[in-house]
Image: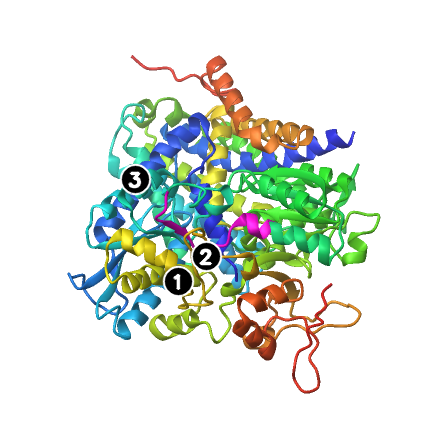
Amino acid sequence: MNNETSRRQFLTWAGRAGFGGAALAVLASCGKSGGSNGASNNVSSGSQSSSGNGFKASGDTLKIGIVAPFSGVAAFVGRIVSNSLDAATAQVNATGGIGGRKVEVVKRDTGTDASAGVKAYQAMASDKNIIGILWAGSGLDESRAQIARDNMPVISVFVDLWSAHQLYPATKERSIFQMIMPDRMALDLLGQYAKEDRGYSKAGLIYDSLISPSAKDYFTEAMAKHGLATAGIETYQLNDADFGPQVRRLQSQKGQALMIWGLAGDTAGIVKQIDKVGASYVDTPTAKGASWRPQILGSPGGTGEHTWADLAGSSAKAGTLTAWHVGGLNYLPSFAISGWMKKYLKKSPTGGEESPADGMYTLLKAVEVAGSTDRQKMISAIETMGEVKFASTPFSYAADRHLSKQMDDLILITLERSSGPVATSPAYQLGQEWKDTYTAGYAGPTHLVRPTLEANKRAHPDVMDEVLRLGYGTQCTKHADGTMTNDCKIH
Amino acid sequence: MTDLVQIFVYGLTVGSVLALVALGYSLVFATSRVVNFAQGSMLVVGGFVAFAVVRAGAPIWLALPIATAIGALVGVAVHLTAIRPLGKFDPASSVGWILTTFSASLVALDLIKMTVGAEPRTIPSLLNSIGGWKGSTISGIPVSPNDLLIVASALALMVVGEIVQTRTMGGRALRAVSQDPAAASLMGINTNRVVMTSFAVAGALGAFAAVLLAPRLFVKFDNGLLLGIQAFVAAVIGGLGSTRGAVLGGYVLGFVGGILRVTSSSGGQIEPLVIFVVFLLVLVVRPNGLLGAPVIEKA
């Protein structure tokens, strides 16, 4: 369901990928040769132009540059971006384009090579027909200075700049905007949940220091903000084969919650190790008990996706939580991206497709509002055009806020099993997606409305009404008349 | 005591994982003086083939030989497409093999992506119990039957490799090609076939390792690159071309990692640094690795 963090973390990781040292130098140089060549090849064979319905580039076409990994280990990011944008451009063009002008996306491959991202940007910046860029690959950090000089409108769809205070107005690059939910917000929400909803007093952290090096800072900040004590901070690195030492130290600290930040394969390995030492989560009272049985609170990609539940198997316990955003609930019928993908591509979204499509529409709307492709006017338009709705939930930017997400947009996702709800008193029922969306036997996330329900209602009243009315993903009790109570229960 | 047990368990299991993959690098280098950069991708090929076979309804014990056989075939394909077309070359001065083996790796990965898919997968463990024993804890450190299987496999393969090399005709041919390909050829040994066989065996080893490692590392595309690099380092530390060296190198890395991680919560962060310091020290003191034989240039 939620591949977005995987993508984001992959992109962060991409710049740091490898193992360092002499052997890496050999392989990295090969990798760069291969990677760069791969990127270049992709560029020439297809600096692919895709309008989704066959329009060719022309002077009457609005061209949008896409910088994303279409090859290499992060190629799945490129597939999501392609699916999203192919469907979205097809929809825009089928409905008359923007001011009568068709839309075309120009894709450039970064692989996992930051320098390929820089080169891709340089090539696009010199193309006067490109009105703005969607950035989903590596090289954004390295290109910031030039982006500022060029005044190029850039929407970061899968790169988290905000968390590291690298997004305007914290920095001077006013033309860069961020679509993706920031890690810092996610950890803040999880800390708030641990303290206020579960009543925990201490929590630990284990994170991938290669792909999420700042997770420790965000965690520490959240712990201090919500008055939680730290019960151990441990690191691991992408693809570690054993988590025994870290889990043993965490066990000695006896945190009631454990935040896990990384990619699905590794975080699944961590909960398997926790299971092996007999410390799997049961419920809140047990988590607060004498033995170490922490509730797992994780990153979206690391604990909130179907893949994770598959990999961790029986070690993935119901009640595992992760933070996500309302717009990512792309199984909701009212979210357009799902329908466009089915209509134009005969595919279903796998998670995260809303972000590139909404990023693209931001640029198109800016042209429409500005009445021009002048970059400065477009940037001002993005800052002032107010709320926009396109692929999923409405979003907006402002002159002093270049981040599309706000705390009220965030929700919490809990892992459930289709065998039924775990025992609680009073009992709750699983959301409707178990019957309507997923296959039998599925173990994966549903969304939990109680801790964030009021905030989400403030931000997206229509969406949350739909969620409650249809019973999607709630753990609320349904009344005899079919309405859902807001007194939702969790483990 | 618990720390010692933890280091021992970590070092043995992770070291065995690396040793299994390093064996493939070492074997190919022994016969061809080429580092097969497609070796890491064998882990991906083997793992995803095993997954596909299991998904089709076959038991994991059948998936293992099928994946291993396909790994061998892919190894042969790598040799035929990435090495053989280069003709006779000196690996020390001609570096075309770096690009061709790396390219072969990318092709293999893309084929898997197109046919099986790219999502991380899980496959059943080969060994869930030994005589009813399903695992236990030693000083609080859990040990499972699959952990023992990984360690036993690495050691057994090293022993088998040694026996094959020293006591069979094929092994002697391999050593002859390794020591002097020209002389071996003059003695009637088909050097091309020996090299191709080494690629096949390396491919089979990679695929075998992938199935064995799946309970720990799952079946993932990352395994090919990241584990491949670490195993390459292990093979170089042990001495490229040496079977015992590959296993020793794996355990050196495993135990270094174990000591660092058990003694410090930031051990994982400094592990790459320490490992490459060890790597450089070994190469400075013993340029051919701990157990590698020096290459004697013939006049």
Packing grade of label 2 (10 A; few <14, some 14-19, many >=20) is: some
Tag 1 residue: A358
Q: Position of residue B30 (x, y in %)?
A: 42, 28
Q: Nearer the viewer, residue A408 or A342?
A: A408
Q: What residue type is labelled 3?
A: Gln
Q: What residue lies at 48% left-to-right and 54% top-to-bottom?
A: B48
Residue bounds of the magenta highlight? A173-187
Instruction: Characterize the local packing of mark 1: few (<14), some (14-19) or many (20 or more) Cα atoms within 10 angstroms.
Output: many
When the figure is inspected, residue A28 is found, relative to residue A354, above or below; the finding is: above
Q: Marks 2 and 1: in contact by CB < 8 Å?
A: yes
Question: Where A322 sits versus A122, above or below?
Answer: below
Q: Farthest left residue?
A: A59
Which quadrant is the C terminus of chain A positioned in?
bottom right
What residue does disc 2 label?
A: A404
Which chain is indicated by disc 1?
A
The spot of residue A156 in percent (x, y) is 40, 51
Q: How far apart, in angstroms, are the residues tagged by discs 3 and 2? A: 23 Å
The vertical placement of A476 against A85, above or below, is below
- Horizontal side of residue B198 vs B2, given as left or right: left
Q: Point out the tag, 3 or 2, that comes first from the N-terminus.
A: 3
| Element type at mark 2 | loop
Q: Do labels 1 and 2 share a chain?
A: yes
Q: Name the residue under label 3.
A: A146
Which of the numbered marks, if any, corresponds to residue A332? none
